[in-house]
Image: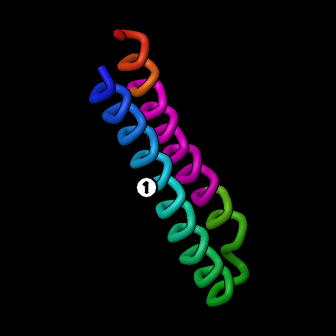
Amino acid sequence: MSGTIALAIGICMTSCAAAGIGIGMATGKAVEAIARQPEASKSIRSLLLLGAVLVESTAIYGMFVSFLLLAKM
């Protein structure tokens, strides 16, 4: 029983940590791109937001899976 709790917490924390790392890397690259080409800042910003939404959805899916594992107990 406690193994399932540990697995659920591990899935949740791994997906949230990976999302944080992904958004951080994407933001850094977007800032670099805007610094190199300020005239393309609108398209870079829109692509950054789209990527951030996709990365956050991955974290939400991980949290959802961990809740499903906890509910199975």
* Corner quadrant of residue 61: top left
Q: Quadrant of the C terminus?
A: top left
Please provide percent x and percent y for residue 41: 70, 72
- Could you tell me the amino acid type at mark 1? Ala
**Residue shown at 45% from the left, 46% from the top:** 13
Residue toward you, 5 or 66: 5
**Residue shown at 27% from the left, 29% from the top:** 3
Instruction: Report the span colored magenta.
Output: 47-65
Q: Is residue 55 magenta?
A: yes
**Residue shown at 67% from the left, 63% from the top:** 45
Position of residue 60 in the picture relative to residue 3 (left or right): right
Label 1 SS: helix
Q: Quadrant of the N terminus?
A: top left
Position of residue 62 in the picture relative to residue 42 (left or right): left
Position of residue 45 in the picture relative to residue 60 (left or right): right
**Residue shown at 66% from the left, 80% from the top:** 34
Q: Is residue 20 magenta?
A: no
Query: Of all residues shown, which one is farthest toward the front?
Result: 2
Q: Which residue is mark 1?
A: 18
